[in-house]
Amino acid sequence: MSDTGKILLVIGGGAAGLFCAVNAARLDPSLKVIVAEKSGKLLSKVRVSGGGRCNLTHACPSIGDMAQHYPRGAHFVKKTFHQFFVTDTIEWFESRDVPLKTEEDGRMFPLANTSQAVIDCLMREVNTYRVEMRMNREVKEVKLLKEERTPEIGKDAKTAPMPGTGDAVATATKKFAITFNNGERLEADFVCIACGGYPKSSMFDWLRALGHTIEEPVPSLFTFNMPGHSLNALMGVSVPEAQIRITGSKAVTDKPSNDIQPHNMLSGSKLREKGPVLVTHWGLSGPAILRLSAWGARELAACGYEFDITINWIPAYNEQSAAKELQRLRFELASQKVVGKNPFGLPSRLWEWLASQAGIGDSLRWADLPAASQNKLVRNLCVQPFSVKGKTTFKEEFVTAGGVKLSEVDPNTMQSRKLPGLFFAGEIVDVDGITGGYNFQHAWTSGFIAAKTIAGGAIVAP
Ligand SMILES: Cc1cc2nc3c(=O)[nH]c(=O)nc-3n(C[C@H](O)[C@H](O)[C@H](O)COP(=O)(O)OP(=O)(O)OC[C@H]3O[C@@H](n4cnc5c(N)ncnc54)[C@H](O)[C@@H]3O)c2cc1C
């Protein structure tokens, strides 16, 4: 229980909120820390993440490299990672009896292979540091009660409170009033908003009321639908490395007006990704598609998820080098059937389908391959066009792009630049990563920085 009467209210019992809460309570034992969670469950995304194993970070030795995995917020996380990086996450969990393991692709999981290990660890900290949980409390409003009265750290060293001593509290009343859905009201000195991403713009209204700007939310990490396409019959086929390029969109009009002609907003797009691709019964999925959806989240939303792509199924080749290779194969494999011999290591069902799309029958031999079919096969292998119509949410690791505008949050403290005493952590800010543990790393990092700042006694001048 608090010595000083200082209260931190954390809004949201997810990864970022609980990490902030337990660290703040540990670093400043005089602080009373309360977590308000709107649902009846804590850490629900941690539980289901990584297929129930919780991919809690990514083994990446360099801050610069790590930051490149965030389509939004790369510059921001470069700064926050200097305070709490992957190495700190590993140490934090391992020193609390959660050893971690790294998979071949760099994703890190608890050695126990279950997210329960992460949940148990965080809940142990909750109990040890007596963090109070208020469940089924949805915050409806956060209101500033009064302007700054607590002396600012560093402004007047003689009168400023020592971190954690609560010197200022005897004279200062609380700074924020928080109202919950059940009508309950709470006053707090610090508020950390860690409520995750919201899918709808209107859900951010209570944050806009605090004077913050919201970057419009759009989904990130989704798969591409190609309804009725013959490729979908190959569902389950995966290619370890293909290159996908976004080449154009359906014609759209940004602002309907007589003067503005519909235009193809994605022509000349630089959006492309290389990596594993999986054919599903509705279209395309796999790491390369998910990464592309994250990088293109805003543009693809703007064109209503109707756009064109090309796939190079054999990215070690371009049209010229693939044509040369096919020419060579005509001689080398002359008497063999084209569909029977798959020369590029592609899954045989895909090779057969690509050949059939080029008009190559089952019995055609390499020596008899007509030039037109050979050219078509080269194009299908290297620049095969597809039209995407719609998306499917990737339920394994869905995130929302958008949230509190980054220029309004100080990455050194995670404090609002508009309202001292107000902090943010996790997906609520306009940061999102691709799949692979990047989103949880941002949650731990931002939660920790907010905790450290608050426990340092810190209302820092914005
Ligand atoms: C199925 C799934 C799997 C995922 N797997 C991974 C993975 O393996 N690796 C990875 O890095 N990322 C993964 N992610 C993304 C990751 O889970 C999120 O980026 C991360 O959970 C964000 O943490 P957060 O604490 O900011 O938000 P959240 O985890 O969303 O927590 C926010 C909490 O705030 C509560 N809340 C919201 N509004 C209010 C309010 N007004 N008042 C009170 N409480 C409120 C919510 O109920 C929620 O409990 C996955 C996401 C999903 C959906």
Image: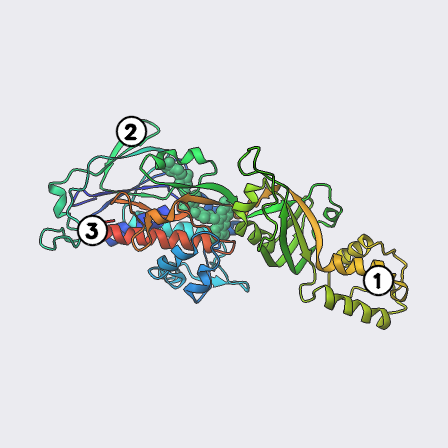
Disc 2 target residue:
184
Q: Which comes sooner in the sequence, label 1 or label 3?
A: 1
Kindly tell me whether residue 441 is visible in this rendering: yes
Residue 186 left/right relative to 407: left
Q: Position of residue 291 (x, y in %)?
A: 55, 54
Q: Amino acid at mark 2?
A: Glu
Q: Is mark 2 within 8 Å of ligand 1?
A: no
**Distance between the alpha carbons at the discs numbered 2 and 1:** 72 Å
Disc 1 target residue:
340
Determine whether the residue tagged by mark 2 lies in a helix, strand or loop. Answer: loop
Residue 224 left/right relative to 144: right
Ligand 1 is found in the corner quadrant, namely top left
Instruction: Please identify, in this view, whether the residue under mark 2 or under mark 1 is nearer the observer.
Output: 1
**Distance between the alpha carbons at the discs numbered 3 and 2:** 27 Å
Q: Classify 215 as above or below 278.
A: above
Q: Residue furthest top?
A: 183
> 266 or 366: which is nearer to us?
266
Q: Position of residue 193 (x, y in %)?
A: 34, 42
Tell me the residue at 61%/53% (across/down). 286
